[in-house]
Image (spheres, rainbow, N blue to C red):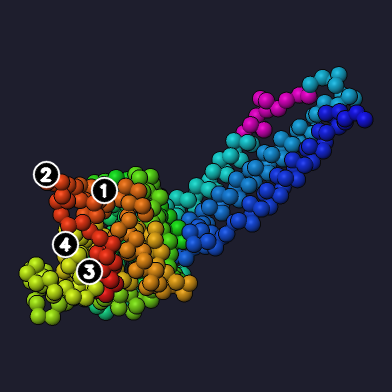
Amino acid sequence: MSLPSSSSWKPIFKRITFSLFAIAALLGMTGCDFKGRMSTFDPKGPIAEMQLEIFYITVWVTLFLFIAVGGALLYAVWKFRETPENKNDPIPRVGHGNPLIEVGLIAASILMLVIIAVPTVQVIWEQHELPVDSERYRERYGDYEQNLLGNWYDGDIADGEEDEVLVIKAYGWQWWWSFEYPQLDGVVTANEMVIPRGKVVKIELRSKDVIHSFWLPKIAGKVDLMPGRVNWMWIQADEPGYYYGQCAEYCGDSHAYMLFRAEVVEPDEFETWIDRQQRTIEAPEGYDTWGAWLGATNQDESLANTPFLKGAKAYFANNCSYCHAINDMSMGNIAPDLTNVKDRKSLAAGWMENVTADNQVDVPKQYENLVEWIFHSDQVKPGNLMYYPSQGLINYINPPLGDDGQPIRTPMTLEDAENIATFLQEI
């Protein structure tokens, strides 16, 4: 029996290829989620909505062009194809040099560009100015004055700031974020920004090292953080929730791990959160300051007799306080502020999640993540600057040897990391 010729297999091969391609396309489409946690198709604020409108305008214009140009091409290919009946006919006359066709195509191209350009310029203008006189904003949200701090925030406000909107200074570091609230007693947090629902917020963007990019897709677009320059943007969130953001500009080893979170709460909840951030961290009973207690423990180690106090002792002994700040306790300023870290729903710049399905802090998971991050941060986040520099944890967990062949300091143990985690969850 002879095998079929290669020509007889071609139609079958084409049908199989087309079928596989169609199946793959359908499977790919099932993976699309227009409501995903970082989807730009699910806007929750005016900036994100304006940007989505421009996207749709661009899509419809380009879709029209694709259909028009592609349709003309297919029509020409089909109408003027060579067949056995016309293979000896002369070549059809071309339209090159036809003024009507050429001017018409130029005019149509300009029209398409204008349809995209006009609303794009309008949106760019609206995004680069606070919506003080925006009729569009007023029609949807009411008077702009309802955003001024003095009109909705009942706590203490820095002098002269009552007639300003809430300002947050966002700093990009390798590879984490800090957020400062200068009008509200200088509250500082790290990697998790809290903002009030329905209020305009001005974000001032600064870089502490290299170029970063602030991207909070459901609320706002991307704006770069440039070394030596202050950029800014305004945002507003219309719905309470937990929103995901990240750095969108390659910035080194752990760029992919440089995430952040924004939690949108009601204005009264925001005020409560600010109060918690401003609270005093009391020193142990019998001591005026944490420094006095620490000095006493150097003489009497039994004063650190609970996991909490052992964690406080280890926090200072391993020089965590040199880099990290905690209200009334340590004043480091080159690493994430740890005040109320127990309230945060993520660690390691958003890479380690501590959040439950109902958007609450998962306390056991947070403890597990704290221990993992403190003792094995080199395995969690490549190149992180808490572990690797000459004064990093690498020299406390595995201290170098002295001339006598012994470690130059007492090594930090896993128990120390566990106690520090307990301490951070209780302060």
State the residue at coordinates (41%, 64%): 353
Q: Nearer the N terminus, badge 3 or badge 2?
A: 3
Alpha-carbon neighbours of circle 2 within 10 Å: few (<14), some, or many (≥20)?
few
Distance of mark 2 from mark 1, alpha carbons?
Answer: 23 Å
Residue 141 seen from this side: no
Q: Mark 3 points at which residue?
A: 311
Dot 3 falls on a residue whose secondary structure is helix
Q: Do the residues labelled 2 and 1 touch (CB within 8 Å)?
A: no
Mark with earlier residue (4, 2): 4
Contact, CB < 8 Å: mark 3 with mark 2? no
- The amino acid type found where label 3 is placed reads Gly
Residue on which disc 2 sits: 403
Q: How crowded is mark 1: few (under 14 residues within 10 Å), some or many (20 or more)?
A: some
Q: Is residue 423 above or below residue 380?
A: below
Q: Which residue type does callout 2 highlight?
A: Asp
Q: Position of residue 390 (x, y in %)?
A: 20, 47
Nearer-N-terminus badge (1/4): 4
Rendered residue at 52%/57% (across/down) = 53
Q: Position of residue 237 (x, y in %)?
A: 42, 67
Circle 1: element type = loop
- Going by the numbered disc 1, the residue's amino acid type is Tyr
The mark found on residue 388 in the picture is 1
Marks 1 and 4, how far apart at CA: 18 Å
Q: Which of marks 2 and 1 is nearer the N terminus?
A: 1
Q: Which residue, given by chain and number where applicable, does mark 4 sit on?
A: 317
| Magenta segment includes 338 | no
Q: Give the range drawn in magenta.
A: 92-103
